[in-house]
Amino acid sequence: MDKKTKKNNRDFAAETAQTKVKFEIFGEEMIEKSVKLSGNSGRVYLPPMWVGHHVKIVRID
């Protein structure tokens, strides 16, 4: 990867981090929770009845 490509990727990341995007999602249930620190990562606990189901996580702030 050359210097120009690296600079373009960095500029794109900065732009996308500051712009808001609208999502329209259809589903069965919604839960709003805060992400908790877990080692070097983050974690969100969901109800056990959601295990095995397909979920989508959207950061809203």
Image: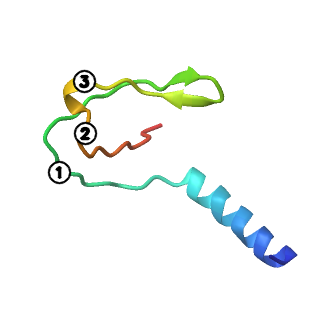
Callout 3: SS: helix
Estimate the spatial distance between the alpha carbons at disc 3 and disc 1, rounded to whole Å: 21 Å
Q: Few, some or many C-alpha atoms within 10 Å of disc 3 (few <14, some 14-19, many ≥20)?
A: few
Q: Residues within 10 Å of mark 2 (few under 14, many from 20)?
A: few
Q: Which mark is residue 52?
A: 2
Q: Is residue 46 left or right of residue 5?
A: left
Secondary structure beneath dot 1 equals: loop
Type of amino acid under label 1: Phe
Q: Earlier in the sequence, mark 3 or mark 1?
A: 1
Q: Position of residue 16 (x, y in %)?
A: 57, 58
Mark 2: which secondary structure? loop
Q: Quadrant of residue 21?
A: bottom left
Tell me the kind of residue under disc 2: Gly
Front position among marks 3 and 1: 3
Q: Nearer the viewer, mark 2 or mark 1?
A: 2
Q: Which residue is mark 3?
A: 48
- Viewed as shown, does residue 41 lie left or right of 8? left
Residue at image coords 73%, 62%: 10
Residue kind at label 3, given as amino acid type: Pro
Q: CA distance from mark 2 to mark 1?
A: 18 Å
Q: Which residue is mark 1?
A: 26
Q: Earlier in the sequence, mark 2 or mark 1?
A: 1
Residue 55: quarter of image: top left
Q: Position of residue 5 (x, y in %)?
A: 77, 76
Other residues around mark 1 within 10 Å, as few (<14) / some (14–19) / many (≥20): few
